Image (cartoon, rainbow, N blue to C red):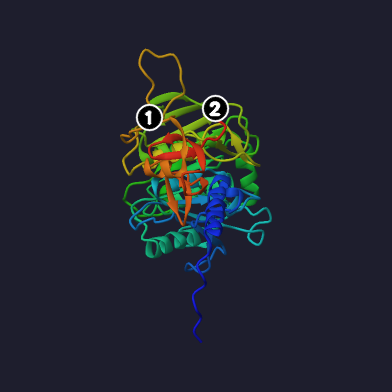
Amino acid sequence: MVTSLPARPPRAALALTTLLLVLAGLLGTGLITPPARAASLVQVGSFGANPGNLAMYAYRPDGLPGGRPLVVLLHGCTQNASGYFADSGWRKYADQWGFALVLPQTSSANNSSSCFNWFQTGDTTRGQGEAASIRAMVAYAVADYGTDPSRVYVSGLSAGGAMSAVMLATYPDVFAAGSIAAGLAYRCASSLTEASGCQYGPTSRTPQQWGDLVRNAYPGYTGPYPRVAVWQGQSDYTVVPANGAQSRDQWTNVRGVSQTPSSTRSLTGGTTLKVYGDDDVRLYEISGMGHGLPVDPGGAADQCGATAAYFLDAICSAYHDARFFGLDGGAQPSPSPTPTTTPSPSPSPSPRATPSATPTGTCVRAGNYAHTTAGRAYQSGGYTYAKGSNDAMGLWNTFTTHALRQTGPDYWVLADGQC
């Protein structure tokens, strides 16, 4: 069957069509909702041997090439992978600096409070239980995502922080560095009864004894041990501050450096940073903070995350950890992150930035087309997104106008109503 072409519409109809298209551009997202970003947290159905009965979730930014780093994130008790992904702030830096995230998830089938079993020897021994399952997820990422096996890191909160210590101790050949937030030293406990004792009070061990627990986790290992950052709220009554000091003692001993800090700095959010050795170990002590992961909601380069249960507004730990891991452009970070502004005879250091034609903090209001041609945004499928943050800006045209603020190198966020 052959269908004839429709008759040419009259001039008045063409004019009306043009007007409607212009109005659509003026209204922006009022008429058409832009699509969500393609990259999202997804569950991996099968990733290999899973003796610990864990679920694997992963996030890869759009267009992430092979050979990029990987960060494993371990949630706390009563939490899950999606909540940790949403609130911890790590997604911002995965998008900005280009690395993948893997989020193991446990369940009430493993532990009544959905905690990782950081105190069970069957789950904290190399090649066994939950530790082996997490290791299998890393192997899957290396094989299927093209992850650089020399740049794999781990970070966790509470029971996840304690499990982070487990992974660093049992697989020092896999993880280059890691962080422990409101967690516990490796093998502080080997039973539920001992776990309660560790959480609520100090354990009498010397740094050498703490270090031996790690060295015994992989007998015969002669390679370098991971660098470690420890985060501890000084008003934490769930995992008391003594645990931060014990983790410090354990990892400084393993790294062969003194328990006396080589430098001490004051950071935002009432945070004191103590650095040990040549940035081998860091201890962040946060005054007045209870039990949780420190976040700092906002659009600045060193702000991230969202406040929620066990996500506490203090300082963006993901930013400082990502720099400690060397993820900000692939270079080794400076020994100390940016301090808060305090009287000093010399200027305070600031995060490294690549040269940019527009100074950080600059706010620009323009049409979406102008933003894209200036490199502040990009278009995909007829819609506009802020470069770096991927904030949705509506239709790609000259009529839809937004304000964008630069918060980092090639990183722009929506700032309507703020400039």
Instruction: Please name the residue that numbered disc 2 is placed on.
Output: 269
Visible in this render: residue 84?
Answer: no
Seen from the viewer's position, the closer of residues 165 and 254 is: 165
Frontmost of labels 1 and 2 is: 1
Left or right: 232 with respect to 341? right
Left or right: 203 with respect to 221? right
Instruction: Please name the residue that numbered disc 1 is placed on.
Output: 359
The secondary structure type at the circle numbered 1 is loop
Seen from the viewer's position, the closer of residues 361 and 350 is: 361
Residue 125 in the image: state x and y as whole percent: 49, 57
| Residue positioned 42% across, 61% down in the render | 141
Residue 190 in the image: state x and y as whole percent: 57, 51
Residue 87 in the image: state x and y as whole percent: 58, 44
The residue carrying pointer 2 sits among few (fewer than 14), some (14 to 19) or many (20 or more) residues within 10 Å by Cα, namely some
The residue carrying pointer 1 sits among few (fewer than 14), some (14 to 19) or many (20 or more) residues within 10 Å by Cα, namely few
Please say if 13 is above or below 398.
below
The secondary structure type at the circle numbered 2 is loop
Please say if 11 is above or below 304.
below
Left or right: 232 with respect to 238? left
Seen from the viewer's position, the closer of residues 166 and 205 is: 166
Q: Are marks 1 and 2 in contact (CB under 8 Å)?
A: no
Residue farthest to the right? 112
Identify the amino acid type marked 1. Answer: Pro
Visible in this render: residue 193?
Answer: yes
